[in-house]
Image (cartoon, helix red, strand yellow):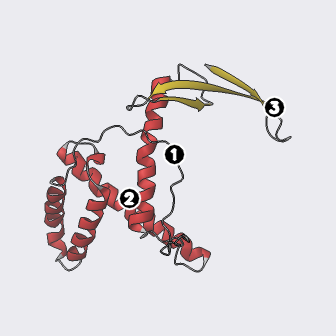
Amino acid sequence: MTLSLTLFVAAHLPAFWEGRAIETTTSHGKKRILLTSLMDRQTYPASEIVHQYEERWRIETSYRELKQELLGSELTLRSGTPETVYQEVWGALLAYNLVRLEMAEVATEAQVEPTRLSFITALHYLRHEWGWMAIEAPGKIPAHLTRLRNRLADLLLTEKRGRSCPRVVKKLPARYPIRAVSKPK
């Protein structure tokens, strides 16, 4: 299905926009319509667009892991200057990618998808083990890494089912307890 919209929003926006609607059914049997500007059906088949839409779940999960686990659910960064903010963000991204790199190594050796490992479990385990590696003799580190990867392979998760959850704004937990007001009798 091809959609054509004429917009009268602002002078700098195009007056005409063409889009493509793709109907799909979720694993729960619910119908969805995906809108895209990728019009070439040969280059961008509907099945591939639907697959990419489902993959976005993993990307959003990665953002959550980075924000909640690595940054400790902090609402703001601790740094006070732009230079140190960049340093803090790059440090968090570096740490995230180091954990993901170890997970990818373990998954490759175990011949499974990297998503079969829990990021949170791997992060806690690696933080603990890397702390111990700091006091080891440099010659023992490769053997320690091999043991570490073998132990991480023992933490494989079961196959993940395909998730298709709509984007929603979740209600934030109250910062303070709410006192119930009693009703007059």
- Label 2 packing within 10 angstroms: few (<14), some (14-19), many (20+): few
Q: Label 2, label 3: how many angstroms apart (C-alpha)?
A: 42 Å
Q: Which residue is mark 1?
A: 167
Which residue lies under the disc numbered 2?
97
Lower sequence index among marks 1 and 3: 3
> Can you give x and y, in whole percent of width and height, for residue 166 in the image?
49, 42
Q: Quadrant of the N terminus?
A: top right
Which dot, 1 or 2, sits closer to the camera?
Answer: 1
Element type at marker 1?
Answer: loop
User: Could you tell me which residue is drawn at 44 percent across and 67 percent down?
Assistant: 92
Helix, strand or loop status at disc 3: loop
Return the residue at label 3: 15
In front: label 2 or label 3? 3
- What's the distance in space between the residues labelled 1 and 3, CA to CA? 29 Å
Q: Is residue 99 above or below residue 38?
A: below
> Along the horizontal axis of the image, is 60 left or right of 112?
right
Whether residue 44 can be seen here: no
Residue depicted at x 82% and y 40% = 9
